[in-house]
Amino acid sequence: MRSSRRLVATAVISAASALVLLGCTAATDTRSETSAPPRTPTAEASAAPSPSATIDIPTEPVAGEIASAVSDRLSTPSSSSSVAGPGIMVADRPFSIEGECLGTRADYSLTTADPADAGRVLVEGTIECGAPMTSSVGSTAGYAGVVQLSFTDTDGIDRAWLRVVQP
């Protein structure tokens, strides 16, 4: 009786092993049948900046700077930051947003950072990569205080910086 149970157990294990092997073989064969041929570079892919291309990311604030943001996927490890300050927004005074990026484009948002009014969007925009950007903006409709500049979509960039300057 004991030897017949062993034979049954051995047969079940052998059958299960065979099914597993057949399953793995079928999955491998299916993938090789559906794999796409190697892609050739297109004009668009060739025009994209290489990882060795670079832009200079400012390391020190400029006069009148009130917020900045950096996204850098090319550094190891990749990094991003958003700094409120060193200055604060003065109500009803014009300001500009300056920046540069490597890639295609990135979206950004300037929001209030004062705890009493945190998170209210003052300005949203897009930076197109390829050339430095300066965008003159009117005023903040009466807001005075700390602001935060953030990238809201970085899928199209490898490296970028932005800053808000209010003279």
Image: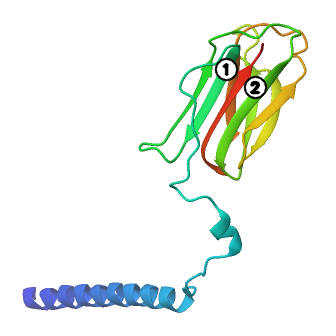
Of the two numbered discs 2 and 1 in the rendering, the one whose residue sits closer to the viewer = 1
Whichever of labels 2 and 1 marks the residue nearer the N terminus, that label is 1
The answer to whether residue 152 is above or below residue 129 is above
Q: Is residue 164 above or below residue 128?
A: above
| Residue at the image position 13 percent from the left and 86 percent from the top | 6
What secondary structure is found at the residue carrying circle 1? strand
Q: Measuring from the top left, give residue 69's x and y in whole percent.
A: 63, 29
Residue 112 vertical placement versus 79 (above, below): above
**What's the CA distance linking mark 2 and mark 1?**
9 Å
Quadrant of the image for the C terminus? Answer: top right
Residue neighbourhood size for the residue with mark 2, other residues' Cα within 10 Å, grouped as few (<14), some (14–19), many (≥20)? many
Left/right placement of residue 26 relative to residue 10 reads right
The kind of residue tagged 1 is Ala
Q: Amino acid at mark 2?
A: Leu
Residue nearer the viewer, 72 or 25: 72
**Residue 138 point in image, percent of width and height:** 90, 21
Looking at the rendered image, the quarter that the N terminus falls into is bottom left
Q: Which residue is mark 2?
A: 110
Residue shown at 67% from the left, 65% from the top:
47
Q: Percent from the top left, x then y, of residue 18?
A: 30, 90
* Residue 92 badge: none
**Where does label 1 land, which residue?**
67
Total marks drawn?
A: 2
Of 65 and 29, the residue lying toward us: 65
Camera sees residue 35: yes
Residue 110 x %, y %:
75, 25
Any part of residue 154 in sight: no
Whether tag 2 and tag 1 are in contact, CB under 8 A, the answer is yes
Quarter of the image holding residue 14?
bottom left
Label 1 CA crowd tier, 10 Å (few <14, some 14–19, many 20+)? many
Colour scheme of the rendered structure: rainbow
